[in-house]
Amino acid sequence: MLCIPVISETTEQALADMEAAGRLADLVEVRLDYVKNPDLPRIIAARPKPLIITITPASENGQFRGTEAERIALLEQAIDLGADYVDINLDCAERDRLIKNCKGTRVIVSYHNYNETPQDLEAIHSRIQATGADIIKIATRANRLEDNFRVLAIAQKSEKDTIALCMGELGEISRILAPLHGAYLTFASLSPGRESAPGQIPAETMHNIYGLQKLQPGCTLYGLIGNPVSKSRGYILFNRLFRRSRMNSLYLNFPVQNLDEFMHSIAPRLAGFSITMPHKQAVMAFLDDIDPLAKKIGAVNTVVNSGGRLIGYNTDLAGALKPIQARTPVAGRRVTLLGAGGAARAIAVGIIAAGGKLTILNRTVAKARALADELGCGAGPLADFPRTETDILINMTSVGMHPRVAEAPVDTALVKNMTVLDGIYNPEKTLLLQKAEENGCSSISGLEMFITQAAEQLRLWTAREADTGLMREILTCS
Ligand code: NAP
């Protein structure tokens, strides 16, 4: 079940927020410690869905500023008025008396730790169970990704209804995975910025991207590892694709600082994952096998877990080569590659392997020369473009990317009679591509490259051919 906490400052606002939350959630929690002079009878009478009343004391990061006696009196009133649930903190001195007098109200006894996920989770679970709570709640801060799985294991093993989740950015995944581990409920925010605890994901995202209500236990896990990962759109693309294809699969973002720890404790749980900066090279040391082209590129952006063996690939290369080859052959053609960074390197290896006659031009000429010497091709500064005969032009610099959309890496008046790929997808149509099209060139956008490489990832992970039209629709509508 999904529960949305309401953190409104007035009774009127709480009533409006409860109604909005009721449309998205199975349960609504009113954090009464946020509401000034709460009109509890009105709040309880107006509940659109089963209601949890929680009054978190200041000592537990709550907003309640009254005395403990006043807090207990409000909880008693909530029970008298027939609230469906009350949340009582494990350390509450009046806990046992409240539990004894709870009438028809179900009692959640909760343990919060805003600093860490302690080692003795099982002992904490047993302590709460011994109180006679109807529902056990454990919420701790994740300082490592592994903490999520330790907390979720508590919900999975428990015979008693248990809410178990992690807080903080590293704990976000626990909120998505909790229902799949048998947790009684998970929390989501009413909208961005209205989180009652750090790491809560907006309810709309839980429904529309992660498809929370449609996921089944045994769900196959994929994800992205990197640092940071928050800017990536892969989780939107893959999760929407999984939902539309009725696949019981999830794609999660893993902010990974410690690659060694991730590869040993989390990677084996995943069927496959994408890798972004800064781990594309370092991940190679942990893999059982690496595709020869990825090895030559010296970077892996995709890992497949094949029966426990982790195999690395680089789909950036296919992302560029496939759309080009759909328009023109590469073998024997003069290919000018602008840029000598990570993406350019992957494409350069692919162009040489496909028989293209490659010239690499880059702002920092030494980088272009080093790559060209390694691959046995030509190199020079960007200023050499007018003297470089070109059938296929590939831009793998960031020139022209938002917000500097009025810039192009080379003189666009010279971009004629060629096939042009621009790796940039923000904007989808860069100045370079606009001018190339005006000059009659065949053009390929960075979005097409991104979709093609993602389709390649999906094929490696699932052996399914991706619907690239659907992928485009998902990315352009989100
Ligand atoms: P990177 O390793 O940081 O390389 C950046 C490249 O851009 C370098 O060659 C750099 O030249 C050049 N550059 C940056 N600012 C410049 C400027 N003001 N003038 C001239 N050259 C400049 O990045 P990357 O990962 O290779 O990515 C490069 C581009 O490819 C980005 O636009 C990225 O969005 C795009 N890309 C697209 C996809 C896709 O699927 N569509 C996938 C991967 C990458 P110096 O060597 O002189 O610094």
Image (cartoon, rainbow, N blue to C red):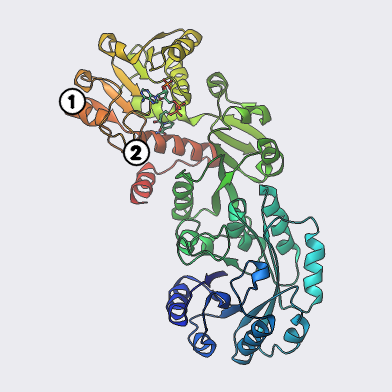
Work out whether 5 lies above or below 305: below
Where in the figure is residue 227, as x and y percent of width and height? 56, 39
- 317 or 17: which is nearer to us? 17
Q: Could you say which disc has been placed on residue 223 in the image? A: none
Q: Nearer the viewer, mark 1 or mark 2?
A: 2
- 306 or 55: which is nearer to us? 55
Which amino acid is tagged 1?
A: Gly
- Answer with left or right where residue 158 lies relative to residue 302: right
Work out whether 244 lies above or below 130: above
Q: Residue at x 55, y 24 (%)?
A: 294
Q: Is mark 2 within 8 Å of ligand 1?
A: yes
Work out whether 71 lies above or below 386: below
- Answer with left or right where residue 286 lies relative to residue 473: right
Q: Residue at x 40, y 38 (%)?
A: 451
Q: Could you say which disc has been placed on residue 426 in the image? A: 2
Which amino acid is tagged 2?
A: Asn
Where in the figure is residue 456, as x and y percent of width and height? 47, 35
Q: Is residue 3 visible?
A: yes
- Answer with left or right where residue 157 lies relative to residue 272: right
Q: Secondary structure at mark 1?
A: loop
Q: Residue at x 59, y 85 (%)?
A: 83
Q: Could you say which disc has been placed on residue 440 in the image? A: 1
CA neighbours of label 1 inside 10 A, class few (<14), some (14 to 19), many (20+): few
Where in the figure is residue 465, as x and y percent of width and height? 45, 40
